[in-house]
Amino acid sequence: MHIPDGFLSLPTSVTLIGVSGASLWFSIWKATRELVEKQVPLLAVTAAFIFAAQMLNFPVAIGTSGHFLGAMLAVILLGPYASFIVITIVLVLQALIFKDGGLLAMGANIFNMAFIGGIVSSWIFMGLKKILPKNKGVFIALVGVVSWLSVVLASFACSTELAISGTFQFVPVTWSMFTVHAIIGLGEAIITAAVVSLVLSVRPDLVALWDGGK
Amino acid sequence: MKNKNFWFFTAGLILAIVLAVFISPFASPHPDGLERVAEDKGFIDMAQETWESAPLPDYTVPGIENEGVSTATAGAIGTLSVFGVGLLVAFVLKKRND
């Protein structure tokens, strides 16, 4: 769901550059306080994995594909603010090196995928985690459900921006975006839950949001 | 402990490179969710090319004729670039802890 330049109005793009810039500043400030030694290579490997996995478009319907987002994977492994930094690195390099996502639209793309898909989804994850039974199975299931939700919410943010920009009417564009991303989200849920359960089984100490089932 | 970390992270990076090099040439070439909606709703033509200096446009290496090799090479360069930038950024941010 990388928005190219031209889809969004100037005020929408500029506003979201401001919001994403402020979020990045805050995430950097948090990282300087919370990022520990072993998370340095973890952040780099997570970013590299997300970039690679984003290249792997899978078919979701006739003539349509989707790909992994990875914001929730980074949230679970590194926490919400480091996740924001990871997704921002991926999106900036994708735009600058591969022309994937616009320059003026970069604020919107970071807002949708790193802020909504990562930070906001992490709040939902942590809220639900508090009220649900504390065990590994529930944790993995919740990772899957919120990963699905993160893609759907990011696509909702995207369609809202398209509507605010006057590119297309809100209801039809939102419905179309929802129906496609509800399917793409299933891929997101499966991949994220699989990777998290793999890391949890070999290196539970590297899963930031896992507290040992307490 | 250091050794354990080294092998875990090396395995993760190798997995990422394998995905980008050997799997990406077989990825679905169809438009993604947003592109599909933009085509169906008729606003795909509003997309503008604002960044002509991208060295590897659309995950291809200009000059490499073979599509699969081009995508795989772009994937390897991208994965290592993201890893390198990630390492640098994380190292700089972490250091201020001390």
Image: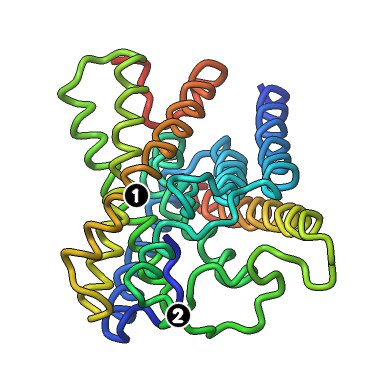
| Residue B91 in view in this figure | no
Q: In the image, which disc is placed on residue A72?
A: none
Quadrant that contains the C terminus of chain A: top left
Residue B84 coordinates in the image, percent (x, y): 68, 54
Quadrant that contains the N terminus of chain A: bottom left
Same chain under badges 1 and 2? The reply is no
Depth order, front residue of B24/A198: B24
- Position of A194 with respect to A168 (left or right) is right
- Between the C-alphas of marks 1 and 2, the distance is 21 Å
Q: Mark 1 highlights which residue?
A: A181
- Position of A150 with respect to B27 (left or right) is left
Q: Which chain carries label 1?
A: A
Q: What residue type is labelled 2?
A: Ala
Q: In this view, does B17 lie above or below A13?
A: above
Residue at the spot 50% in from the left edge and 60% down from the top edge? B31
Q: Which chain carries label 2?
A: B
Residue at the spot 21% in from the left edge and 15% down from the top edge? A133
Q: In this view, does A138 lie above or below A80?
A: above
Residue at the spot 72% in from the left edge and 34% down from the top edge? B10
| Residue B60 in view in this figure | yes
Residue at the spot 52% in from the left edge and 16% down from the top edge? A201
Depth order, front residue of A121/B9: A121
Depth order, front residue of B26/B40: B40
Query: How many other residues sit within 10 Å of disc 1, few (<14), some (14-19) or many (≥20)?
Result: many
Please tell me in which quadrant of the rendered image residue A14 appears.
bottom left
Q: Does dot 2 land on a helix, a strand or a loop?
A: loop
Query: How many other residues sit within 10 Å of disc 2, few (<14), some (14-19) or many (≥20)?
Result: some
Please tell me in which quadrant of the rendered image residue A4 appears.
bottom left
Q: Which amino acid does label 1 sit on?
A: His
Q: Mark 2 highlights which residue?
A: B47
Q: Does dot 1 land on a helix, a strand or a loop?
A: helix
Residue A92 coordinates in the image, percent (x, y): 53, 66
